[in-house]
Amino acid sequence: MPLTASDFDYDLPPDRIAQQPVRPRDRSRLMLLDRRTGRRTHHVFAELPALLTAGDLLVVNDTRVIPARFEARRRTGGRIEGLFLAERSAGQWEVMLRGAGRCRAGEELAVVGDDRVRLTLGEDLGAGRWRVSLAPPEGALDVLARVGRTPLPPYVRRPGALPDAEDRRAYQTVYAARPGAVAAPTAGLHFTDAVLAALAEAGVERASVTLHVGPGTFAPVKGEDLDAHRMHAEWYELPARTAEAVAAARAEGRRVVAVGTTTVRVLEAAGGAGGGRRGWTDLFIRPPAAFRAVDALLTNFHLPRSTLLMLVAAFCSPGSTEGVRVILDAYAEAVREGYRFYSYGDAMLIV
Protein backbone atom coordinates (compact mmCIF):
# COMPACT_ATOMS: atom_id res chain seq x y z
CA MET A 1 0.00 0.00 0.00
CA PRO A 2 1.34 3.48 -0.85
CA LEU A 3 1.89 5.86 2.03
CA THR A 4 -0.73 8.51 2.76
CA ALA A 5 -0.62 11.72 4.78
CA SER A 6 -2.21 9.95 7.74
CA ASP A 7 0.87 7.75 8.06
CA PHE A 8 2.69 10.86 9.28
CA ASP A 9 0.28 11.74 12.08
CA TYR A 10 1.36 11.56 15.71
CA ASP A 11 0.06 12.77 19.06
CA LEU A 12 1.74 15.81 20.56
CA PRO A 13 0.59 17.45 23.81
CA PRO A 14 0.18 21.21 23.25
CA ASP A 15 2.60 21.99 26.07
CA ARG A 16 5.42 20.38 24.04
CA ILE A 17 5.23 23.16 21.41
CA ALA A 18 8.03 25.59 22.26
CA GLN A 19 6.84 29.18 22.64
CA GLN A 20 10.23 30.64 23.56
CA PRO A 21 13.80 29.83 22.52
CA VAL A 22 16.22 28.27 24.98
CA ARG A 23 18.84 30.69 26.31
CA PRO A 24 21.65 30.32 25.60
CA ARG A 25 20.59 28.69 22.38
CA ASP A 26 23.22 25.92 22.49
CA ARG A 27 21.63 24.57 25.71
CA SER A 28 18.73 23.11 23.75
CA ARG A 29 18.47 19.33 23.87
CA LEU A 30 19.82 17.10 21.11
CA MET A 31 18.67 13.57 20.34
CA LEU A 32 21.21 11.41 18.48
CA LEU A 33 19.43 8.86 16.28
CA ASP A 34 21.23 6.01 14.54
CA ARG A 35 18.92 5.42 11.60
CA ARG A 36 20.29 1.95 10.92
CA THR A 37 19.70 0.52 14.37
CA GLY A 38 17.07 2.94 15.73
CA ARG A 39 19.27 3.53 18.79
CA ARG A 40 18.71 6.90 20.46
CA THR A 41 20.83 8.79 22.98
CA HIS A 42 20.24 12.17 24.61
CA HIS A 43 22.57 15.17 24.73
CA VAL A 44 22.64 18.96 24.72
CA PHE A 45 23.43 20.87 21.55
CA ALA A 46 26.72 22.19 22.87
CA GLU A 47 27.99 18.60 22.66
CA LEU A 48 27.63 18.55 18.86
CA PRO A 49 31.39 18.91 18.17
CA ALA A 50 32.00 15.68 20.09
CA LEU A 51 29.25 13.89 18.12
CA LEU A 52 30.71 14.74 14.71
CA THR A 53 33.99 13.53 13.24
CA ALA A 54 37.06 15.35 11.96
CA GLY A 55 36.69 15.68 8.21
CA ASP A 56 32.89 15.95 8.28
CA LEU A 57 31.54 18.71 6.04
CA LEU A 58 28.78 20.70 7.75
CA VAL A 59 26.54 22.48 5.22
CA VAL A 60 24.33 25.29 6.52
CA ASN A 61 21.61 27.48 5.01
CA ASP A 62 22.75 31.11 5.29
CA THR A 63 19.40 32.71 4.44
CA ARG A 64 18.38 35.65 6.60
CA VAL A 65 14.83 36.10 7.89
CA ILE A 66 13.32 39.47 7.04
CA PRO A 67 10.69 41.26 9.20
CA ALA A 68 8.01 40.20 6.74
CA ARG A 69 4.83 40.66 8.82
CA PHE A 70 3.08 44.01 8.61
CA GLU A 71 -0.30 45.57 9.27
CA ALA A 72 -2.44 47.66 6.94
CA ARG A 73 -5.78 49.41 7.26
CA ARG A 74 -8.64 50.04 4.86
CA ARG A 75 -10.23 53.49 4.54
CA THR A 76 -13.12 52.09 6.58
CA GLY A 77 -10.69 51.33 9.42
CA GLY A 78 -10.72 47.57 8.86
CA ARG A 79 -7.50 45.85 9.91
CA ILE A 80 -5.56 43.70 7.42
CA GLU A 81 -2.67 41.42 8.43
CA GLY A 82 0.00 41.14 5.78
CA LEU A 83 2.93 38.86 5.05
CA PHE A 84 5.47 39.97 2.45
CA LEU A 85 6.36 37.12 0.09
CA ALA A 86 8.43 38.56 -2.75
CA GLU A 87 9.45 41.74 -4.55
CA ARG A 88 8.73 41.07 -8.22
CA SER A 89 10.08 44.44 -9.41
CA ALA A 90 10.54 47.94 -8.02
CA GLY A 91 7.40 48.77 -6.06
CA GLN A 92 5.66 45.53 -7.06
CA TRP A 93 5.15 43.02 -4.25
CA GLU A 94 3.49 39.69 -3.79
CA VAL A 95 1.91 39.42 -0.35
CA MET A 96 -0.43 37.27 1.66
CA LEU A 97 -3.32 39.18 3.26
CA ARG A 98 -5.55 38.04 6.08
CA GLY A 99 -8.85 39.83 6.56
CA ALA A 100 -9.00 41.02 2.94
CA GLY A 101 -12.02 38.96 1.92
CA ARG A 102 -14.06 42.04 1.03
CA CYS A 103 -11.22 43.88 -0.66
CA ARG A 104 -11.18 44.46 -4.41
CA ALA A 105 -8.50 45.26 -6.97
CA GLY A 106 -7.71 48.97 -7.01
CA GLU A 107 -8.35 49.52 -3.31
CA GLU A 108 -5.66 51.44 -1.44
CA LEU A 109 -4.44 50.32 1.99
CA ALA A 110 -2.44 52.39 4.48
CA VAL A 111 0.56 50.62 5.99
CA VAL A 112 0.62 50.92 9.78
CA GLY A 113 3.89 52.31 11.09
CA ASP A 114 4.66 54.68 8.21
CA ASP A 115 2.00 57.15 7.10
CA ARG A 116 3.74 57.70 3.78
CA VAL A 117 3.44 54.12 2.54
CA ARG A 118 0.38 52.96 0.59
CA LEU A 119 -0.40 49.61 -0.99
CA THR A 120 -2.75 49.41 -3.95
CA LEU A 121 -4.29 46.02 -4.49
CA GLY A 122 -3.71 44.49 -7.90
CA GLU A 123 -4.42 40.91 -8.94
CA ASP A 124 -6.06 38.52 -6.49
CA LEU A 125 -3.99 35.34 -6.87
CA GLY A 126 -6.24 33.24 -4.63
CA ALA A 127 -5.63 31.56 -1.27
CA GLY A 128 -5.03 34.99 0.32
CA ARG A 129 -2.24 35.98 -2.07
CA TRP A 130 -2.26 39.34 -3.86
CA ARG A 131 -0.09 41.36 -6.15
CA VAL A 132 0.18 44.92 -4.85
CA SER A 133 1.82 48.18 -5.88
CA LEU A 134 3.79 50.16 -3.33
CA ALA A 135 3.88 53.96 -3.16
CA PRO A 136 6.44 55.38 -2.89
CA PRO A 137 8.27 52.50 -4.65
CA GLU A 138 11.03 51.95 -2.12
CA GLY A 139 13.00 48.75 -1.76
CA ALA A 140 11.10 46.11 0.18
CA LEU A 141 13.85 45.56 2.74
CA ASP A 142 13.97 49.27 3.57
CA VAL A 143 10.21 49.49 4.08
CA LEU A 144 9.97 46.30 6.11
CA ALA A 145 12.85 47.40 8.35
CA ARG A 146 10.59 50.27 9.48
CA VAL A 147 7.15 48.67 9.58
CA GLY A 148 7.68 44.91 9.64
CA ARG A 149 7.70 42.37 12.44
CA THR A 150 9.29 38.96 12.80
CA PRO A 151 7.27 36.36 10.86
CA LEU A 152 6.88 33.87 13.70
CA PRO A 153 5.08 30.65 12.76
CA PRO A 154 1.37 30.33 13.56
CA TYR A 155 1.87 27.84 16.39
CA VAL A 156 3.80 30.39 18.48
CA ARG A 157 0.93 31.82 20.50
CA ARG A 158 1.98 33.90 23.49
CA PRO A 159 -0.20 35.80 25.94
CA GLY A 160 0.47 39.49 25.53
CA ALA A 161 2.99 41.25 23.33
CA LEU A 162 6.74 40.83 23.54
CA PRO A 163 9.38 43.17 22.11
CA ASP A 164 9.88 42.31 18.44
CA ALA A 165 13.59 43.05 18.79
CA GLU A 166 13.92 39.94 20.96
CA ASP A 167 12.46 37.69 18.28
CA ARG A 168 14.46 39.41 15.54
CA ARG A 169 17.57 38.17 17.31
CA ALA A 170 16.31 34.76 18.40
CA TYR A 171 14.56 33.78 15.15
CA GLN A 172 17.78 34.17 13.17
CA THR A 173 20.85 31.96 12.83
CA VAL A 174 24.16 33.41 13.95
CA TYR A 175 25.52 32.89 10.41
CA ALA A 176 22.54 34.41 8.55
CA ALA A 177 23.85 36.48 5.65
CA ARG A 178 21.44 36.72 2.70
CA PRO A 179 18.05 38.38 3.35
CA GLY A 180 14.97 36.79 1.82
CA ALA A 181 13.37 34.18 4.09
CA VAL A 182 9.96 34.58 5.71
CA ALA A 183 10.62 31.62 8.00
CA ALA A 184 13.82 30.56 9.72
CA PRO A 185 15.82 27.45 8.82
CA THR A 186 15.22 26.32 12.39
CA ALA A 187 17.84 23.58 12.71
CA GLY A 188 20.43 26.34 12.57
CA LEU A 189 18.96 28.33 15.47
CA HIS A 190 20.85 26.22 18.03
CA PHE A 191 24.32 27.25 16.86
CA THR A 192 26.41 29.78 18.76
CA ASP A 193 29.74 31.29 17.85
CA ALA A 194 31.29 29.08 20.53
CA VAL A 195 29.86 25.90 18.98
CA LEU A 196 31.05 26.94 15.52
CA ALA A 197 34.53 27.60 16.90
CA ALA A 198 34.56 24.21 18.65
CA LEU A 199 33.51 22.49 15.42
CA ALA A 200 36.36 24.14 13.52
CA GLU A 201 38.78 23.15 16.29
CA ALA A 202 37.53 19.55 15.99
CA GLY A 203 38.32 19.49 12.27
CA VAL A 204 34.74 19.84 10.99
CA GLU A 205 34.60 21.87 7.78
CA ARG A 206 31.74 24.25 7.00
CA ALA A 207 30.12 25.40 3.77
CA SER A 208 26.96 27.35 2.94
CA VAL A 209 24.00 27.17 0.62
CA THR A 210 21.01 29.51 0.43
CA LEU A 211 17.33 28.65 0.36
CA HIS A 212 14.90 31.46 1.13
CA VAL A 213 12.30 29.64 3.21
CA GLY A 214 8.71 30.48 2.27
CA PRO A 215 5.42 30.28 4.18
CA GLY A 216 4.64 26.89 2.67
CA THR A 217 7.10 25.35 5.10
CA PHE A 218 4.33 25.43 7.75
CA ALA A 219 1.63 23.97 5.51
CA PRO A 220 0.51 20.41 6.31
CA VAL A 221 -0.37 18.05 3.49
CA LYS A 222 -4.16 18.38 3.47
CA GLY A 223 -5.17 15.50 1.22
CA GLU A 224 -4.31 11.85 1.77
CA ASP A 225 -2.76 11.37 -1.69
CA LEU A 226 0.87 12.46 -1.47
CA ASP A 227 1.21 12.44 -5.25
CA ALA A 228 -1.38 15.21 -5.42
CA HIS A 229 0.49 17.57 -3.09
CA ARG A 230 2.28 20.49 -4.72
CA MET A 231 5.14 22.22 -2.94
CA HIS A 232 5.54 25.99 -3.02
CA ALA A 233 8.65 26.87 -5.02
CA GLU A 234 11.52 28.47 -3.09
CA TRP A 235 14.60 30.22 -4.44
CA TYR A 236 17.95 28.56 -3.77
CA GLU A 237 21.62 28.86 -4.61
CA LEU A 238 24.35 26.24 -4.41
CA PRO A 239 27.65 28.16 -4.73
CA ALA A 240 30.34 26.53 -6.85
CA ARG A 241 32.72 26.39 -3.89
CA THR A 242 30.14 24.49 -1.83
CA ALA A 243 29.44 22.09 -4.70
CA GLU A 244 33.17 21.44 -4.95
CA ALA A 245 33.48 20.89 -1.19
CA VAL A 246 30.60 18.39 -1.24
CA ALA A 247 32.09 16.53 -4.21
CA ALA A 248 35.49 16.38 -2.52
CA ALA A 249 34.03 15.09 0.76
CA ARG A 250 32.10 12.34 -0.97
CA ALA A 251 35.07 11.34 -3.14
CA GLU A 252 37.21 11.05 -0.01
CA GLY A 253 34.63 9.10 2.00
CA ARG A 254 33.93 11.97 4.40
CA ARG A 255 30.40 12.68 5.59
CA VAL A 256 28.25 15.54 4.34
CA VAL A 257 26.16 16.73 7.31
CA ALA A 258 23.20 18.86 6.27
CA VAL A 259 21.89 21.41 8.78
CA GLY A 260 18.15 21.36 8.22
CA THR A 261 15.70 20.08 5.65
CA THR A 262 16.17 23.24 3.57
CA THR A 263 19.85 22.41 3.10
CA VAL A 264 18.93 18.86 2.11
CA ARG A 265 16.54 20.18 -0.53
CA VAL A 266 19.24 22.41 -2.03
CA LEU A 267 21.83 19.64 -2.19
CA GLU A 268 19.42 17.10 -3.60
CA ALA A 269 17.75 19.53 -6.02
CA ALA A 270 21.12 20.57 -7.42
CA GLY A 271 21.94 16.92 -8.08
CA GLY A 272 25.68 17.22 -7.59
CA ALA A 273 26.12 20.17 -9.94
CA GLY A 274 29.89 20.64 -9.97
CA GLY A 275 29.80 24.28 -11.00
CA GLY A 276 27.07 25.32 -8.61
CA ARG A 277 23.49 26.16 -9.44
CA ARG A 278 20.71 28.60 -8.60
CA GLY A 279 17.00 28.71 -9.31
CA TRP A 280 13.64 27.67 -7.91
CA THR A 281 12.89 24.31 -6.37
CA ASP A 282 9.61 22.64 -5.51
CA LEU A 283 11.27 19.30 -4.73
CA PHE A 284 9.09 17.11 -2.49
CA ILE A 285 11.23 14.46 -0.78
CA ARG A 286 9.30 11.62 0.85
CA PRO A 287 9.69 7.86 1.37
CA PRO A 288 10.97 5.86 -0.44
CA ALA A 289 13.31 8.56 -1.78
CA ALA A 290 17.03 7.97 -2.17
CA PHE A 291 19.68 10.55 -1.26
CA ARG A 292 22.68 11.41 -3.40
CA ALA A 293 24.48 14.10 -1.45
CA VAL A 294 23.71 13.89 2.30
CA ASP A 295 25.09 11.41 4.86
CA ALA A 296 23.83 12.89 8.15
CA LEU A 297 21.09 15.35 9.03
CA LEU A 298 20.66 17.85 11.84
CA THR A 299 17.01 18.84 12.16
CA ASN A 300 14.28 19.96 14.54
CA PHE A 301 11.08 18.09 15.48
CA HIS A 302 8.43 18.78 12.84
CA LEU A 303 4.66 19.09 12.53
CA PRO A 304 2.45 16.05 11.87
CA ARG A 305 1.64 15.52 8.18
CA SER A 306 4.26 18.10 7.17
CA THR A 307 6.54 17.73 4.18
CA LEU A 308 9.46 18.31 6.57
CA LEU A 309 8.56 15.23 8.60
CA MET A 310 8.19 13.25 5.39
CA LEU A 311 11.68 14.26 4.26
CA VAL A 312 13.16 13.22 7.61
CA ALA A 313 11.31 9.88 7.45
CA ALA A 314 12.74 9.27 3.99
CA PHE A 315 16.25 10.03 5.26
CA CYS A 316 15.88 7.53 8.09
CA SER A 317 15.65 4.67 5.57
CA PRO A 318 16.55 5.74 2.01
CA GLY A 319 14.87 3.74 -0.69
CA SER A 320 12.20 2.26 1.58
CA THR A 321 9.26 3.26 3.76
CA GLU A 322 10.73 1.81 6.96
CA GLY A 323 11.93 5.25 8.01
CA VAL A 324 8.37 6.24 8.93
CA ARG A 325 8.41 3.78 11.83
CA VAL A 326 11.96 4.80 12.83
CA ILE A 327 11.17 8.51 13.03
CA LEU A 328 7.77 8.14 14.71
CA ASP A 329 9.30 5.87 17.36
CA ALA A 330 11.94 8.55 17.97
CA TYR A 331 9.26 11.25 18.20
CA ALA A 332 7.28 9.18 20.72
CA GLU A 333 10.40 8.92 22.87
CA ALA A 334 11.00 12.66 22.52
CA VAL A 335 7.49 13.32 23.84
CA ARG A 336 8.07 10.98 26.80
CA GLU A 337 11.43 12.62 27.54
CA GLY A 338 10.00 16.14 27.51
CA TYR A 339 11.65 17.44 24.32
CA ARG A 340 10.40 20.75 22.96
CA PHE A 341 8.96 20.69 19.42
CA TYR A 342 8.86 22.89 16.32
CA SER A 343 10.71 26.11 15.46
CA TYR A 344 11.93 27.17 18.91
CA GLY A 345 12.23 23.55 20.05
CA ASP A 346 15.02 21.01 20.41
CA ALA A 347 17.10 19.23 17.79
CA MET A 348 17.88 15.77 16.44
CA LEU A 349 21.06 14.51 14.75
CA ILE A 350 20.39 11.56 12.44
CA VAL A 351 23.44 9.55 11.40
Image (cartoon, rainbow, N blue to C red):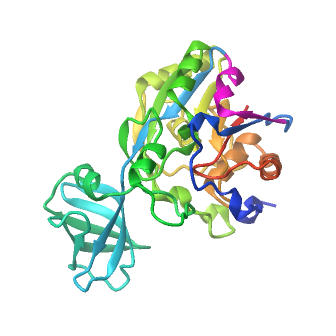
Q: Is residue 149 visible?
A: yes
| Residue found 23% across the figure and 55% down from its top | 143
Span of residues in magenta: 40-53
46 w.r.t. 232: above or below: above
| Residue found 25% across the figure and 64% down from its top | 113
Considering depth in this image, is 251 or 301 the residue closer to the camera? 301
Q: Is residue 259 visible?
A: no
Considering depth in this image, is 28 or 38 the residue closer to the camera? 28
| Residue found 44% across the figure and 48% down from its top | 166
The quarter holding residue 349 reads top right
22 w.r.t. 107: above or below: above
**Residue 64 percent across, percent down from the top left:** 40, 42
Q: Is residue 271 magenta?
A: no
Considering depth in this image, is 116 or 319 the residue closer to the camera? 116
**Residue 331 percent across, percent down from the top left:** 77, 50
Left/right placement of residue 224 relative to residue 107 reads right
**Residue 221 percent across, percent down from the top left:** 62, 64
**Residue 325 percent across, percent down from the top left:** 83, 50
The quarter holding residue 265 reads top right
Quadrant in the picture for the N terminus? bottom right
The quarter holding residue 41 reads top right
